[in-house]
Amino acid sequence: MESVELDVLGQRPGLSRLYTQLCFCFAIPDTSPQSQSTILGHLRHSLEKLTLAFPWIPGQVIRSSTGIFEIQPYERLPRLLARDLRTELPPMQEFRKDGFPFRLLDENVIASRGTLPDEHDTCAPVFEIQANFIQGGLLLVFNGQHNCIDMAGEAQMIYLFSKACCGDPFTTEEMKVGNQSRSDIIPLLSGYEGVIDKTDNQSEHQRSAAGAVSGSPESFWAYFGFNPHALTELKSSAMQHVSSEYISTDDVVSALIWRSVTRARLPRFLGPAETRTTFARQVNTRSHLRIPATYPGVVVHKVNTAMKVDDLLSTSLGEVASQLRGSLREEDLGYRTRVEATELYRRLPSGTIRGGTGQRDLSTDIVMSSWAKEKCYDFDFGLTLGKAEAVRRPRFA
């Protein structure tokens, strides 16, 4: 393969060697060594087909001598690792009984590499898979390098891998979009001289000294599950107190998370009446730029909504959801993404690009990335096991 220059939004050093993981939990009747070998052979053969159609997928992300991140050749196929954890992890029925909890899905055990860069990592492969066998189950974990694929892009590549597993041919359009040039995918603004920091640092400009926090309580990872009926009821309740014609379920869940986390933090705020909190949503802006939804690169823009803590907690859930929706309407998302890309492009020669999440006070702010639109439960990878019982983001180390 030839080197592939990454798109402008993938040029942030803060994304370098950062990985997005996704774990698919399948029940399998037979986890004997012979069955494991058959499954691994099937997955490996499917990676052959995926690589043949998308030659960049077994590559690695390198920062070239010019300071530009690009995909360069690495291995013949994406790595497929396997672990027999039948004696180290509980059986599938215990995973199922406990709701596939964070504590059983440790990235250090079930993933090919961690989310955050490790000082011992010497390379950054684009795409890796680890198949973990437990008694009565398979935990199939995908790892995507964040400079070159965002969550929508990773879901697309997992979908294409599932097609290969099922023996379905790739369409001409899938191959065209999946292999198209990345460096010019987002049209830059000619003659632009503005500064994007006004938007990106919104929370800093609104921060008050009263927002200082006291103490640093112990924290831990946890999943919160919402069944479809609960989501319907939650949105119905929120719709009774809205100021906009439309709010999405995502808006309502985001508002619930913002208010709930802020309420839990309240005892640590020294002056909640004046403290401001910002909710930052990572928004997929492909449709706003006429970029195909199946483009596998990085096309996200951060949209901020800020409120005083007291106002946030005293405002109805529906109204907070309306404000989150309003932030999406107020911005021309396509234009703002082009502004961001243009500003990043201007900084490439100087190497002064900031990290991937901007400068935030995470004692008061929340950065949210929703994967709700990704149809991960539709993938079966041709394993004749049915659909995954659960799809989870493994626990960060």
Image (cartoon, helix red, strand yellow):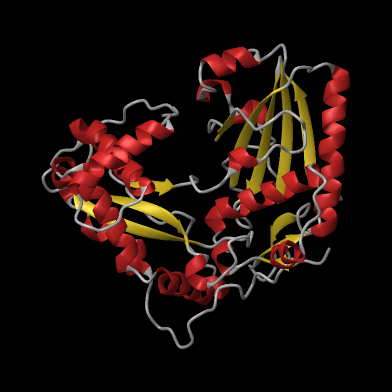
| Quarter-of-image position of residue 252 | top left
| Residue at 65% from the left image edge and 26% from the top image edge | 109
340 is higher (above) or lower (below) than 109: below
Q: Position of residue 46 (x, y in %)?
A: 83, 44
- Dividing the picture into quadrants, the one containing residue 43 is top right
- The residue positioned farthest toward the left in the image shown: 273
Relative to 161, say whether 83 is above or below. above
Tell me which residue sits at (17%, 43%) in the image.
Answer: 316
The answer to whether 323 appears left or right of 41 in the picture is left
Instruction: Quarter of the image for the N terminus: give it.
Output: bottom right
Question: Does 255 sit above or below residue 290?
Answer: above
Figure label count: 0
Q: Residue at x 58, y 47 (%)?
A: 18
Residue 130, picture quadrant = top right
Q: Residue at x 32, y 50 (%)?
A: 279
Question: Along the line of sight, which residue is nearer the eye, 114 or 284?
Answer: 284
Picture coordinates of residue 335 (x, y %)? 42, 75
**Between residues 318 and 130, which one lies in front from this camera angle?**
318
- Provide residue 113's location: percent of width, then percent of height: 66, 37
Is residue 21 visible in the rendered image? The answer is: no
Q: Quadrant of the C terminus?
A: top right
Q: Is residue 167 visible?
A: yes
Q: Nearer the viewer, residue 208 or 258?
A: 258
